[in-house]
Image (cartoon, rainbow, N blue to C red):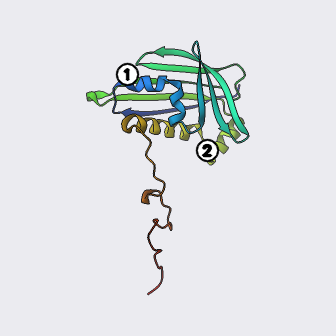
Amino acid sequence: MAEDSTVAYAATILKPRQEVYAFWRDWQNLPRFSRHLKSVEDLGNGRTRWTTEGPQGDVSWEAETTQDVPGERIAWQSVGDAKVHNHGIVTFTDAPADRGTEVVVHMAYDMPGGFIGEAVAKLTGNSPEAEIAESVRRFKAIMECGELPIVEGQPSNLKRGDNVPGEASPKVGVR
């Protein structure tokens, strides 16, 4: 196995710890906030099958839950001949001053292609760091709002030079 790429990301979620833990603990919820996951199937006895969409098609592997302390932490690791060896732990603690739950995600991946694969992933915006950060932000949105915010078609999602639907194009350089 190549050297792991380790990632950590934290967020404070304005919901009670048990509720936040329970949502994450239902493995089948993970694809709702992790774009790279197509599905996570609970196989029973602490085993799950994870499937992600890769450039050459779907990639699946099995994982086992190595720690499960209700309301506090969940840990897992890939097992067998996983194409992407990984392990992780998510901790849940009460935020100070009754401000919800602090969630900290630690993950380690054996990146396909080693350091070259990791460099390519970073250049294309598909690095484990970016994926975990986005997943935790999406998890926070689902927990606090009940859904993911969508910005397509809104002015905040327009790129420079785009027009807002229904608005006339600005006349640049015309007097």
For residue 148, what is the image quadrant? Answer: top left
Among all residues in the image, which is located at the extreme top?
A: 45
Report helix, strand or loop for mark 2.
helix
Q: Residue at x 64, y 34 (%)?
A: 52
Picture quarter with the N terminus: top right
Q: Quadrant of residue 145?
A: top left
Label 2: how many Cα within 10 Å (few below 14, some 14–19, many 20+): some
Relative to the observer, which residue lies in front, 4 or 29? Answer: 29
Residue at x 70% of width, y 25% of height: 82
Q: Which mark is residue 140?
A: none
Disc 2 residue type? Lys
Mark 2 or mark 1, which is nearer to you? 1
Residue 27 lies, in percent from the top left, at 53, 25
Distance of label 2 from label 1 (alpha carbons)? 34 Å
Please provide percent x and percent y for residue 84. 67, 29
- Please identify the quadrant where the C terminus is shown: bottom left
Q: Circle 2 sits on which residue?
A: 122
